[in-house]
Image: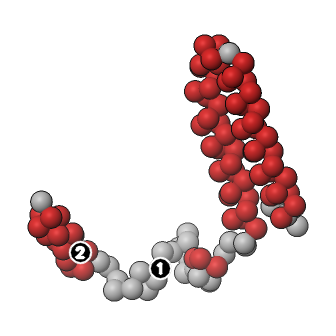
């Protein structure tokens, strides 16, 4: 099985080498509405967007936890409510940290 896995990886690597458009990924730059890009694709985003992304992910994970919780809250009773308040407290602490770090400032 290991030999099959090694051969599959080697085959995919060789197929990539054979069919790749450019030897270096950044040499074949995409066009933006027919214009060549003026700057590097990775240099366009300010570092504050990463903090905003982490804040979004915190709320996204919160919703992933809240939907199943809403289904079973009646069955579990007060333990589920206490658990949700502990979770919301942790999310609130994360939001306060993001606020302190400046993730909510856009200027």
Mark 2 and mark 1 residues within 8 Å of each other at the beta carbon: no
What residue does disc 2 label? 13
What residue is shown at x 75% (from left), y 36% (from top)? Answer: 86
* Disc nearest the viewer among 2 and 1: 2
Q: Residues within 10 Å of mark 2 (few under 14, many from 20)?
A: few
Q: Describe the element under mark 1 as helix, strand or loop.
A: loop
What residue is shown at x 62% (from left), y 83% (from top)? Answer: 39
- Quadrant in which residue 87 is drawn: top right
Viewer-closest of 25 and 9: 9
Q: Residue furthest top?
A: 74
Q: Residues within 10 Å of mark 1 (few under 14, many from 20)?
A: few
Q: Describe the element under mark 2 as helix, strand or loop.
A: helix
Q: Is residue 93 left or right of residue 16?
A: right
Residue 95 x, y percent position in the rendering: 80, 50
Viewer-closest of 32 and 86: 86
What residue does disc 1 label? 29
Image quarter of the N terminus: bottom left
Residue 29 x, y percent position in the rendering: 47, 79
What residue is shown at x 73% (from left), y 58% (from top)? Answer: 52
The circle drawn on residue 40 is none
- Quadrant in which residue 59 is drawn: top right
Q: Is residue 55 left or right of residue 102?
A: left
Residue 49 x, y percent position in the rendering: 72, 64
Q: Is residue 30 left or right of residue 68?
A: left
Q: Is residue 35 left or right of residue 14?
A: right
Residue 13 x, y percent position in the rendering: 23, 75
What residue is shown at x 24% (from left), y 80% (from top)? Answer: 17
Per the model, the C-alpha gap separating discs 2 and 1 is: 22 Å
* Residue 68 drawn above or below residue 56: above
Q: Is residue 83 visible?
A: yes
């Amino acid at each position: 099985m290991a030999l099959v896995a090694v051969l599959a990886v080697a085959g995919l690597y060789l197929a990539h080498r054979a069919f790749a458009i450019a030897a270096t990924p950044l040499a074949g730059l995409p066009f933006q509405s027919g214009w060549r890009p003026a700057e590097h694709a990775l240099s366009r985003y300010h570092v504050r967007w990463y903090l905003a992304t982490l804040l979004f992910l915190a709320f996204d994970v919160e919703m992933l936890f809240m939907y199943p919780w809403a289904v079973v809250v009646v069955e579990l009773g007060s333990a589920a409510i206490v658990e949700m308040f502990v979770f919301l407290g942790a999310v609130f602490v994360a939001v306060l940290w993001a606020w302190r770090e400046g993730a909510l400032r856009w200027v």
